[in-house]
Amino acid sequence: MTPVLAGPRAGATALSGILAIDKPAGMTSFDAVRQVRRIFNEKRVGHAGTLDPTATGLLPVCIGQATRLVDYFHQQNKTYRCTIRLGERSDTLDTEGEITTGGDASAVTEADVRAAAALFVGEIEQVPPMHSAVRHEGRHLYELARSGQEVERKARLARIDSIEVTAFRPGVCAEADVTVVSGKGTYMRVLAADIGDRLGSGALLAWLSRTAYGPLRLEDAVTPEALAEYPDPATALLPLDSAVMFLPRVDLAPQNATMVGRGQSVWLPRVPDLTAGNQCRVHSADGRLIAIGEIAGNLLRPTKVLNT
């Protein structure tokens, strides 16, 4: 994994790139960002997609110029491994909250769980949980929840591409292990509770790990603790285009690359197959990602120029 160098900036490191962080349980996503800032001595650090403190797994962390690409991660699928516990409920929908007894799940079978889960595949609506970062009148819902308030939340569209039940353990409090592939804005805690409601037993999310996010995989990730021990942490950085691999690629000759770097549009003799609307990622002749652009006919217009 080779670091991608950005132009120098006074008072800060010249490194830009993406880290695949393996977040341990008990650490907030912001804690992970804070550790990366300290390791790299870089203020421009942000993550793509919050993981709850109890959750583990893949957290993309963007450094330097890569922070401008966070929104492109949000457009990509994520894969989760979850354990859903039937027969219990929680005010936070997971094990962090106050757990109460739900309905007896001893009659629930693996086939029942599969059938209930299948109802949530596709475009669905989810009501954000009170213990979430969604804002209500300028305040996070979790702040209101901690002060004992509960407010009405509007349902939001979410997308689930697949749910696979990989194991089932029957009982009064049964457990189902599932693998979920989802799009932006999907709450696994809400999914677990909704499946439990469908089965009549109630449910909570007992365990969660994110194993993939776009092109990133958990097996290639590094914990913050291990990263701090690297002789050169920059060797863990992935290229900027790791955030936008799903966009079709356009390679430009030096003169056109210079024009795009100045924010100017250029004419393309050959247009790539556009698989993500009219967006594309733009590379210079030496392979560097220099911009994100939009294509109209044969005209490429840069919409985000990267100072690489």
Image: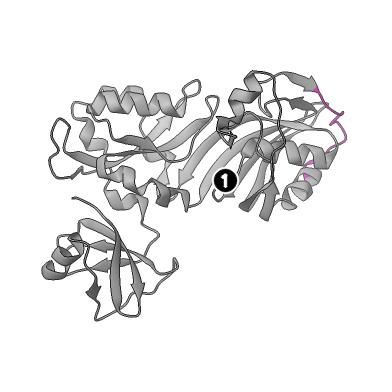
Where residue 185 sits: x, y (%)? 57, 45
Any part of residue 248 in sight:
yes
- Residue 23 in the image: state x and y as whole percent: 44, 29
Residue at the spot x=60%, y=44% of the render?
186
Crowd band around label 1 with a 10 angstrom C-alpha radius: few (<14), some (14–19), many (20+): some
Q: Is residue 276 above or below residue 211?
A: below
Residue found at x 27% / y 30%: 43
**In the rendered structure, which amino acid carries the disc numbered 1?**
Gly
Res. 123 image quadrant: bottom right
How would you classify the magenta stretch by its main secondary structure? loop
Q: State yes or no: residue 103 in magenta.
A: yes
Q: Is residue 266 above or below residue 127?
A: below
The quarter of the image holding the N terminus is top left
The colour scheme applied to this rendered structure is one colour
Q: Which residue is mark 1?
A: 185
Q: Which residues are magenta?
A: 101-110
Q: In this orientation, which residue lies closer to the viewer: 149 or 277?
A: 149
**Looking at the rendering, which quadrant does residue 133 occupy?**
top right
Q: Residue at x 21, y 35 (%)?
A: 234
